[in-house]
Image (cartoon, grey):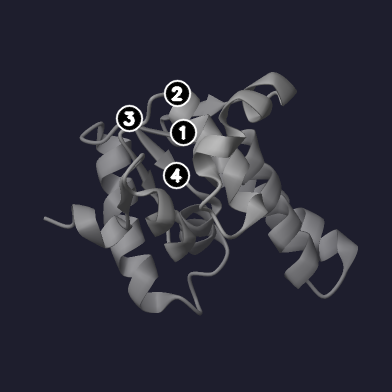
């Protein structure tokens, strides 16, 4: 199972018009997820960040809420496993493993992927390269046939 980071979900849902090249590869990647050729998961952390991104980048609250809701609906129609928020206990147990991550916001994603025994983190966030020796870092382009 692959862990899908927020960065990939954003390209799939909200930033496709400004991320045209990445969106093309991401669209092919998600077609493989939809067909069952790839097994994937994401987390409530990622879903929350997608919604926050919509709110932060919209001209007003109502528009951001509508875009966020539409993006979440699009994601939730995919055959993904939805992983829970990382618990306080899990964070305490595993945070040290991921101390090489420069962005603290990436740590819950790494822990969620680690606890779920994901085979890789699929992202457009190069910070995850710092932990590739623990959980391989991939991009959707890596799955193009």
| Residue located beneath label 3 in the image | 1
| Circles 4 and 2 in contact, beta carbons < 8 Å | no
The disc, 3 or 1, on the residue closer to the chain's N-terminal end is 3
| Circle 4: element type | strand
Is any atom of residue 34 visible in this view? yes
Q: Answer whether residue 76 is visible to the viewer in this image.
A: no
Residue at left offset 36%, top offset 39%: 134
Q: Which of 111 and 34 is in front in this view?
A: 111
Q: How far apart are marks 3 and 1 (CA)?
A: 9 Å
Please report contact status of discs 2 and 1: CB closer than 8 Å, yes or no: yes
| CB atoms of marks 4 and 3 within 8 Å | no
Marker disc for residue 116? 2
Residue 54, percent across and down? 71, 61
Instruction: Give the number of the mark in front: 3 or 1.
Output: 1
| Residue under label 1 | 113
Mark carried by residue 47: none
Across and down, in percent, residue 62 comes to: 87, 60
Query: Farthest residue toward the right?
Result: 61
Residue 47 vs 82, above or below: the answer is below
Instruction: Provide the residue designation for mark 4.
Output: 4
């Amino acid at each position: 199972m692959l862990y899908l980071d927020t960065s990939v979900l954003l390209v799939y849902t909200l930033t496709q018009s400004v991320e045209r090249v990445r969106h093309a590869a991401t669209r092919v990647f998600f077609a493989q997820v939809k067909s069952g050729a790839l097994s994937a998961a994401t987390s409530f952390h990622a879903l929350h960040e997608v919604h926050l991104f919509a709110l932060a980048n919209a001209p007003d609250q109502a528009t951001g809420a509508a875009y966020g809701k539409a993006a979440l609906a699009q994601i939730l129609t995919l055959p993904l496993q939805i992983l829970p928020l990382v618990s306080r206990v899990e964070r305490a147990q595993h945070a040290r493993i991921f101390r090489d991550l420069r962005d603290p916001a990436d740590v819950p994603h790494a822990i969620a992927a680690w606890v779920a025994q994901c085979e890789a983190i699929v992202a457009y966030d190069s910070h995850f390269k710092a932990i590739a020796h623990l959980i391989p870092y991939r991009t959707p382009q890596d799955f193009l046939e």
